[in-house]
Image (cartoon, grey):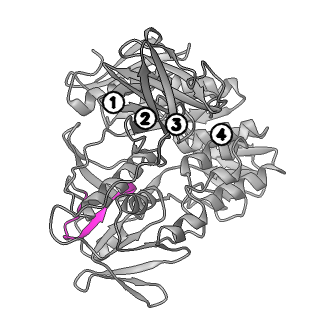
Amino acid sequence: MAANLSGQTGPDLALGIALTDLPDGGKLVGHRDGEPVLLLRRGSEIFAIAANCSHYGGPLVDGLVADDTVRCPWHHACFHLRTGEALRAPALSPLACWSVEQRGDKIIVGEKRKKHTPAPREGDAGAAPEKIVIVGGGAAGFAAAERLRREQFQGAIVMISDDEALPVDRPNLSKDYLAGKAPEDWIPLRKEGFYAKNGIDLRLGTRVTDIDVRASEILLADGARIAFDRLLLATGAEPVRLTIPGADQPHVHTLRSLADSRKIIAQTGIARSAVVLGASFIGLEVAAALRTRGVQVHVVAPDERPMERILGPQIGDFIRALHEENGVIFHLGDTVTSIGATEIQLSSGGILAADMVVAGIGVRPRVGLAEAAGLATDRGVLVDSYLETSVPGIYAAGDIARWPDPHSGENIRVEHWVVALRQGAAAALNMLGRRTKFTDVPFFWSQHYDVPINYVGHAEGWDEIEVEGDIPARDCLLRFRRGGRVLAVATIFRDTESLEAELAMERGEAVLT
């Protein structure tokens, strides 16, 4: 998914536009020196920023302006209008900004401004740490390290990852990259040089075996010990593994890492048929990607409908129909009992040809380190509003963290990429003593062929789903209510309304009622 990044859309803003062409609250896309520029007007103030989101290039002219920010319509990144700073994931890079002046009845866009650099500042609670250790090389761990340096933290950062690859854009592993639409160059969140340049001691292929809480040290598999002033656990989740006969064969895959995605891609070159086990997000995104590559796909799952547990029966039926339109064959209410070299056996007695098998049957949080260290856990690592665990100075973020969600009023744990990024950034601020509560509304998106589904909020259960619009026509908004209160909103091609729902939840307002 990428926007048209050509810089020649609209007027040449160096020559100016009439003030009347940009009314209060208006947005207009033009260009300056070949770059696309978005003009926004709020009262007497006019802002000029890059027209496309720094995440996947979403068109910010279709986004939502709130206070001094603009939010991307695609994946809900948020940028400061005055500085271009990326305030909220999934965007990590800032937007360029230009100077603007009004000459009589014209608006003129001048030179590009220098990149904004936040000034160093002391923490608000106690002495600043000298050394921060991050365990985990996924979204939360990377976002924490990146934010620490963005905040001008001058101390040592050690980042431990048991993966062999640099931190990657994990959603792409089951979406565009797996489908062959995105080159591998897009996958690393930052190139290797970023870590050295920013003084981040990134240690790949390294396993942490223990946390010595009393000594404030972690123990590595090779026997080395690393001291810390603050520790962030961002160990993420791992796929649930199959335990049936034949599950250990080389053509049976799970998908979590870049290495996993590479193996699946390599096999698509020779495989004619694939069986995907599981009809939730990962399984069906894999199915869509494999169909894009021309592989015949069967989906086997015990569920009555795809994604029903999260998105309800209406979206579930739509998703099934969408995949069937693209050639996927479903075997719902069924399971696999054994896997052979070229076929699988179903519990219903059927046999399916399978040159390759991909299991997307769920993940479990990697909480072993936390449990062994005596941290409080409950189907995840328990943290407070500041993402601090039961042991002071040790924080947790991402797929392992169970936090008090102010919007649902419950302690929740979610396995969403954007949440992990945002929690990592929030944990960084709190490790610096900023005492910033994590109050972001959960958000995720799922992509199936050319159909994106955006979801804000969190509803583990509901007593009503209110449907607005036409689901089969791919133009809809669904509200998930419990006790009359909207807990979550799902949309298809209603990007502005998805952003408005997120903003309303943040403000504690009624959601699009």
Up/down of 70 relative to 235, above or below: above
- Residue at image point 26% right, 33% down: 506
Q: Identify the residue at image location x=64%, y=29%.
A: 7
Question: Residue tagged by mark 4?
Answer: 287
* Mark positioned earlier in the residue sequence (1 or 3): 3
Q: Which mark identifies residue 502?
A: 1
Q: Main secondary structure of the magenta part?
A: loop
Q: Is residue 38 above or below residue 115?
A: above
Residue 410 spot, x, y in % from top left: 21, 43
Q: Name the N-terminal-most of marks 2 and 4.
A: 2
Depth order, front residue of 364/402: 402
Q: Nearer the viewer, mark 3 or mark 4?
A: 3
> Badges 3 and 4: C-beta atoms under 8 Å apart?
no
Residue at numbered disc 3: 111
Residue 132 sits in which quadrant?
A: bottom left
Residue 476 magenta: no
The magenta segment: 387-399
Question: SS for tag 1?
Answer: helix
Q: Which residue is mark 2?
A: 76
Q: CA distance from mark 1 to mark 2?
A: 9 Å
Left or right: residue 279 versus residue 385 is right
Sequence-wise, the earlier of marks 1 and 2 is 2
- Kind of residue indicated by mark 2: His
Other residues around mark 2 within 10 Å, as few (<14) / some (14–19) / many (≥20): many
